[in-house]
Image (cartoon, rainbow, N blue to C red):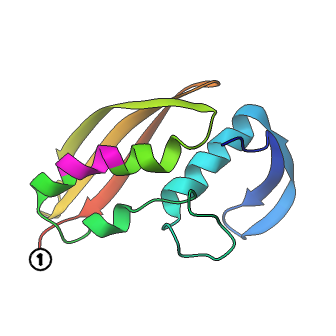
Amino acid sequence: MAYPSKTYKIDLETMRIVGTIEDREAYLQFLDKTLSTEKYSWDYYDQYFGNSIRDLIGKDKGIIMARFPTLIEQALMPDDRTIGVHDFTYEDDEISSDVVHISFYVSSIYGEVYYTKQLQYGG
């Protein structure tokens, strides 16, 4: 699916449109929005936008480690600017015993982007 290279810039603190952006900056905003938006949570977005990471909250750490890469790929690969997602690493939180930090790289036509997400697991 082709997303526009030029789009509105959103100030994430105020949640207001503050101009326009394009190319790499627009793609980075797409990544941030996609990885922070639950799939099907907004009528505005089509069935391809967002992620299903929330389905992993409260699950066993092994399930998170097995399913997380697939959910991230499903969220990001519909955008034709995304080439791939790779090098997932998992690190336990130093403070909370039921939190895992998951890091990964996104390859795009604009280069590599490094991401870290935090998920709570267990009951």
Disc 1: which residue: 123
Residue 2 left/right relative to 64? right
Taking the magenta stretch, the answer to whether it contains residue 54 is no
Q: Position of residue 107 (x, y in %)?
A: 50, 27
Magenta residues span 65-70
Quarter holding the C terminus? bottom left
Amino acid at pointer 1: Gly
Q: Residue at x 18, y 47 (%)?
A: 66
Query: Element type at marker 1?
Result: loop
Mark 1, residues whose alpha carbon is within 10 Å: few (<14), some, or many (≥20)? few
Rendered position, 101 above or below 120:
above
Please name whichever residue, 97 or 52, is drawn nearer the observer in this view of the structure: 52
Q: Position of residue 59 (x, y in %)?
A: 16, 67
Residue 81 left/right relative to 64? right
Q: Residue at x 33, y 46 (%)?
A: 70
Please name whichever residue, 92 or 6, is drawn nearer the observer in this view of the structure: 6
